[in-house]
């Protein structure tokens, strides 16, 4: 038997384990997005319902938990998921570059078949797409959560913040661009997460999961895009 | 047929390489890609030059020695085909064809189109076997194998270990190879006692060799001459993630 010369790296830090971690973080974020989209759609029920829902999120399980206690528990879970997802992504990105001389899919001199055989656009834009989404999320939090950036005017009412912001065309445009990046990320990411966790068991399952990824992505994109477009069109207002 | 070849030439492991252009004439459409390279090498040798080094052995698609990236695709443009089973009729008269070696950091180029694929051997050595007492072969029916599991193991065993999956992977991952090896033994009853240890040891070796991780892009399965499906990578992920919390390495 050949001598095992190369040093062993512990399996807990293996690329497989990191992909599993990234997948769990990603799935938690997708679940958050579903809840977030549901909350956004309350904008169609009017200011009282929307602001009431926002206030309710802070009083869940009161008085068992202090004010905003449940919300902060969810926020910490979400932050840990985001942190683990991004950390794993950068470590894996570094390893992929090291394995390919830093050139990834462009390491052959031939200019023929640069796009490979069957890979999707979504699958090879995961990393830069993820960075785009991260930058948008920072801006989005400063705008609508922390109330620091206030295009269209700051307000204590979440409903008014949302309506003021999305009445401006470039706010809606930047939101749509970020959603496009999110859509591509989820199109590949949902399938990839399931496969990374070992759930892809056959060629048929691979097809089904890809169809599920497209469906979930489409529902999320439509659900997130409809409120800002309706606000911009003036159908939902103060 | 007349073909213009742009071939990666590199004198040895440490030397810098470059693409060199050659013209070959009188190529029959019925020649295999390797036979076309043979024609070129005969001409180079007769002219006193250095023939192009490339790996080849059985030339019938089962040994896994072929390792040519043809026009940017591992094993060339035909699906489920090794470079030795690729025929010149799949190209056009006068075509310019780029030929490069497998590219990945764990596969150093030894000369021209020949790379060292010892990393794959070391992954198999780390756990791609079962420990069984020696002696006479056991009676075939002593351990029943469900037909579905036998089929799955056979499908995985079709992997010829050529490394095209690594050559095609944008992450430089050998996960399809690894998935085939782990599925092959993990699907059979004989592979169960060491299933956890095998998955952990092989994935550790895979990473230690410097291969990247799998992001489920699927280029590997598209170029695989043995048709190893992408779900065998998911099987590998499943087995590793299931073994991690148990954390047992039966071989210490």
Image: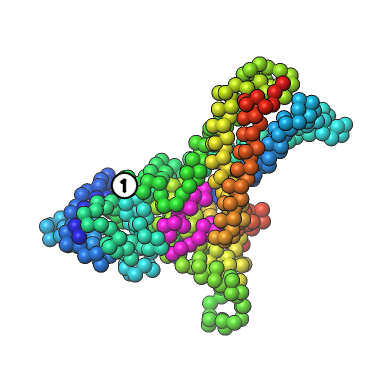
Quarter placement of the N terminus of chain A: bottom left
Asked if residue B36 lies left or right of residue B80, the reply is: left
What x and y, as percent, mark residue B54? 28, 59
Q: Do we see residue A56 in this rendering?
A: yes
Image x and y of residue A187, in percent: 56, 45
Which quadrant of the structure image shows residue B183? bottom right
Marker count (numbered)? 1
The residue most toward the right is A63
Residue at left offset 62%, top offset 78%: B144
B214 in the magenta segment: yes
Q: Nearer the viewer, residue B185 or B35?
A: B35
**Secondary structure, magenta segment, majority class:** loop
Q: Which residue is mark 1?
A: A110
Residue positioned most to the left: B47
- Determine if the magenta segment contains residue B68: no
Residue B125 location in percent, x, y?
48, 62
Q: Residue at x 66, y 34 (%)?
A: A79
Q: Residue at the location (55% across, 68% down)?
A: B152
Magenta-highlighted residues? B209-236
Residue B77 found in image quarter? bottom left
Specify the quadrant that holds the C terminus of chain A.
top right
Q: Position of residue B211 (x, y in %)?
A: 46, 50
């Amino acid at each position: 038997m050949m001598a095992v010369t190369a040093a062993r790296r512990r399996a807990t830090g293996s690329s497989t384990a990191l992909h599993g971690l990234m997948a769990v973080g990603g799935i938690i974020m997708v679940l958050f997005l579903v809840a977030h989209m549901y909350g956004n759609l309350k904008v169609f029920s009017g200011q009282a319902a929307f602001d009431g829902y926002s206030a309710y999120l802070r009083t869940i399980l009161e008085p068992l938990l202090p004010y905003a206690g449940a919300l902060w528990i969810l926020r910490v879970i979400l932050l840990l998921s985001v942190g683990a997802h991004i950390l794993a992504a950068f470590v894996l990105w570094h390893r992929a570059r090291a394995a390919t001389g830093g050139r990834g899919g462009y390491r052959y001199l031939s200019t023929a078949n640069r796009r490979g055989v069957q890979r999707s656009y979504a699958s090879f834009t995961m990393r830069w797409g993820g960075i785009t989404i991260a930058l948008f999320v920072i801006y989005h939090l400063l705008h609508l959560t922390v109330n620091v950036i206030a295009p269209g005017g700051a307000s204590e009412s979440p409903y008014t913040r949302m309506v003021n912001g999305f009445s401006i065309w470039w706010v809606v445009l930047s939101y749509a661009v970020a959603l496009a990046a999110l859509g591509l990320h989820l199109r590949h990411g949902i399938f990839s997460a399931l496969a990374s966790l070992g759930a892809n068991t056959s060629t048929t399952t691979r097809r089904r999961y890809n169809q599920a990824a497209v469906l979930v992505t489409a529902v999320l994109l439509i659900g997130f895009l409809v409120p800002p477009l309706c606000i911009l069109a003036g159908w939902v207002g103060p | 047929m007349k073909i213009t070849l742009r071939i990666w030439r590199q004198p040895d492991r440490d030397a810098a390489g470059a693409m060199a252009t050659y013209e070959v004439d009188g190529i029959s459409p019925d020649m295999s890609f390797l036979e076309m390279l043979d024609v070129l090498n005969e001409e180079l040798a007769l002219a006193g030059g250095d023939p192009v080094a490339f790996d080849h052995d059985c030339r019938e698609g089962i040994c896994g020695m072929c390792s040519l990236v043809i026009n940017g695709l591992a094993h060339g443009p035909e699906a489920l085909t090794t470079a030795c089973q690729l025929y010149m009729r799949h190209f056009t008269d006068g075509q310019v064809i780029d030929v490069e070696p497998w590219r990945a950091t764990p596969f150093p180029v030894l000369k021209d189109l020949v790379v060292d694929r010892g990393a794959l051997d070391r992954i198999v050595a780390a756990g791609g076997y079962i420990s069984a007492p020696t002696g006479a072969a056991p009676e075939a029916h002593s351990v029943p194998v469900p037909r579905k599991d036998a089929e799955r193991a056979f499908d995985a065993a079709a992997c010829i270990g050529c490394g095209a999956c690594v050559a095609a992977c944008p992450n430089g991952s050998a996960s399809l190879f690894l998935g085939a090896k782990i599925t092959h033994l993990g699907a059979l009853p004989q592979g169960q006692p060491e299933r956890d240890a095998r998955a952990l040891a092989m994935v550790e070796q895979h990473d230690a060799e410097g291969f990247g991780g799998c992001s489920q892009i699927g280029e590997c399965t598209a170029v695989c001459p043995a048709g190893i499906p992408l779900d065998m990578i998911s099987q590998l992920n499943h087995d590793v993630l299931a073994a991690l919390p148990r954390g047992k390495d039966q071989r210490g």
